[in-house]
Image (cartoon, rainbow, N blue to C red):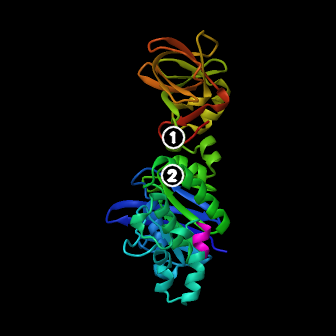
Amino acid sequence: MVDVVLEHLTKYYGKVRAIEDINLHIKDKEFLVLLGPSGCGKTTTLRCIAGLETPTSGNIYMGGKLVNDVPTKDRNIAMVFQSWALYPHMTVFDNIAFPLKMRKYPKDEIRRRVKEVAELLQISELLDRKPGELSGGQQQRVALGRAIVREPNVFLMDEPLSNLDAKLRVYMRAELKALQRRLGVTTIYVTHDQVEAMTMSDRIALLNDGLLQQVGTAEEIYSRPANLFVAGFIGSPPMNFIDGSFVEKYPEKAYIDTGFFMLDVSEFKDIIKKNATSSELVIGIRPEHITLSREPAEGAIKAKVYVIEPLGRKIIVNLQVGDTIFKVEEDPKFKSEPGEEVWMIFNRDKLYIFDKKTGKTVV
């Protein structure tokens, strides 16, 4: 039973912040994904857990034991990297067996473990080949086999699928998730790919600029983003945003004035007044939560078709409202031409309002 706890984990390179005050509890057998854009600190976090980087401050616990001063080789972890780093002159068998040979396991034990791992990964027929004779997917499985054979307490994976082509990456996502379930090993997985994170994870820890933004399931982060960054990073196409000012009109009415349209937010008036730090707000709405109409309706917003992106089972209609582009997910049956006027209707149950100054979610 091994969980991993990060307590106020901070790492600076000179005066440059890599990560700061990361507090995170990865549960036993959990598949947690560290997600974020390039340079956000996710790989640094992973390397600190592995013992490859020394934290500037903070603590790392594994199975309740403080491991800050425990060497990497004694942490009983296994890492899979973006580059699989297989030994080209060795057979698949020897590549997988390498960590066991380094620890001087008996030959019979090595043979048994390698055979079990090869069967698990369905690469038994490849054991006598060398890496240069394998496809990318097969090489990736060998790298996984080398990690699994040690029977570690924790798997650390740094974008292990990024070198695969798109079709194979989709296939290996499901395979890797199923494998982790069967093995029941606590897994921390780094990626910048939100689809990978959402499909594979038990929970996601989203970082930006070295700071932890939100931790939760894919559904929680998608439906209840903590701030503007989370809302804009999660979702494809991303959430639509437009700036506006909060305006009250006597006696009970309230609006957000964007300069191009007035959005009635009377039912959120008290929440906005309580939680917002100023009148400057940002409206957020996802593309799938906007309905298009060819006729004006109450609360509808006039827009002009800018461009249409066909995606097979759906289309993305880009609409221009003033100097802002809104993306709307529509059925391919919706036929329109650039320059045509249409009307947007927001699903008010799916409307988000953010504090422009702090970035925090208000509604």
Of labels 1 and 2, the one closer to you:
2
* Residue that appears at 40% across and 52% down: 38
What residue range appears in magenta?
116-121
How far apart marks 1 and 2 lie (CA) works out to 29 Å
**Amino acid type of the residue that numbered disc 2 sits on in the rendered structure:** Arg
Quarter occupied by the N terminus: bottom right
Q: Residue at x 48, y 55 (%)?
A: 191
- Residue type at mark 1 is Leu
Residue drawn 57% across the image and 28% down it: 314
Judged from this view, the residue extending furthest toward the top is 295
State the image quarter where residue 129 is shown. bottom left
Q: Secondary structure at mark 1?
A: helix
Side of 2 relative to 355 (left or right): right
| Residue that carries the numbered disc 1 in the rendered image | 228
Residue under label 2: 169
Whether residue 300 is in magenta: the answer is no
Q: Earlier in the sequence, mark 1 or mark 2?
A: 2
- In the displayed structure, 279 sits above or below 180; it is above
